[in-house]
Amino acid sequence: MKHVKVVYALFFSALIQMLGAQEISDTKFGKGMINFIAKDSSFSVKFAPRFQTRYQSEWEYSGSNYTPASYNFLVRRARLKFDGYAFSPKLIYKVELGLSNRDISGANLYNRNTPRYILDAVLKWKFHKDFELWAGQTKLPGNIERVVSSANLQLIDRSLLNSKFNIDRDMGIQLRHQSKLGGSWISREKLSLSQGEGRNITEGNLGGLQYTARLELLPFGKFESKGDYSQGDLAREKSIKAMFGFTYDYNQNAVKTRSNMGSYMNQTAGGLFETDINTVFLDGVIKYNGFALTGEYAKRTADTVEALEADGKTKTGAVVNTGSAVNFQGSYLFKNNVELTVRYTSLDFETITRLSDLRQLTYGISKYVVGHKLKVQADLSFTNANEMKDSILFRTGFDLHF
């Protein structure tokens, strides 16, 4: 930890020296705390910290019987984001560091039992018209809810579908292309080859590789202000805009219970159980004049659901989280920048996983002071699980993004 503090101190010292040597190109709130462009235009840097604070309270009920509420306050996310270009505007970079406990949790044998500070560290090279090559650690082209930044959510957090089935971040390369199909139609294709164990792995590749492909179709042209990757219709689209996406992910010889997420499937002899895992996502976003609707479907299968010991017969007790889920989210933004949102999520796991099926209904309200950059939110969720009492979850908090 001492070494980490020294690194941060040196970094910010260098940043302050840059501030004195360069002109600030943009100081408007929400556009980054510090913006630099080198005098010879050989590089640029934008520094944009952000944090989210939360309060939540949860209790269970069955008929008229209530359990005492549990509650806590937390810094849900605290992050430092740096982006810009290097050498040429066609070579873009992004670095995002996480500082909250939730951001850096997950230390294990395969990342040297250290905090996982790095969220994104990726280069994006626009090597040809409408083509980009990405290399490094970043989000895979998975379900739309996951790819939308946590800075741009219209509820306190993402849905249960995302928490159980998303494919998150990984280390690898991605090839991205965009093309016009005629009229207003736009097609975006994304291909990814990654390590398959998630972010910040240091001990070599375990199992096989992960292959991801995503296709997005926009029949009515581009959204205002990249609204397909920001929840709610804050831009108040003047005409109907829509995006429909399909993702297929194949993790060969996966060693975790949720593809590149979840826990490792350890064997008593010291090895890891491997199985092929397939994940499919269908999703869509429609926006018009303050109304926004998002729908998602996820399906996960595995060649072998119950992990086995090295003998190929004895069960280890670990299971792959196979099953399906749907998530629907609708909202309306009033002219005073208050937004009401309703979300319904349903999870159905395979019986062999011994996981409880879930149904959740969430009501949310948001007040946007400066769009997603400064907002106050609250939501109330009612969850029903098989063979369990119903539960109620209340959450509120604010977001501040420079």
Image (cartoon, rainbow, N blue to C red):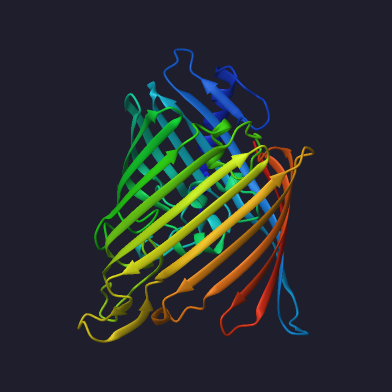
Percent position of residue 192, x then y: 31, 46
Percent position of residue 290, x then y: 68, 40
Percent position of residue 145, x then y: 52, 51
> For the view shown, which residue lies furthest in the left direction?
311
Residue at figure coordinates x 73%, y 82% from the top left = 67
Residue placed most toward the observer, 143 or 81? 143
Above or below — where is 243 with respect to 323?
above
- Does residue 18 appear left or right of residue 166 in this picture? right
> For the view shown, which residue lies furthest in the top direction?
40
Q: In this orientation, does residue 202 appear?
A: no
- Does residue 90 appear left or right of residue 391 in this picture? left
Residue at figure coordinates x 50%, y 32% from the top left = 222
Q: In this orientation, does residue 299 appear?
A: yes
Residue at figure coordinates x 50%, y 27% from the top left = 45
Percent position of residue 44, x then y: 48, 24
**Quarter location, residue 321:** bottom left
**Quarter location, residue 238:** top right
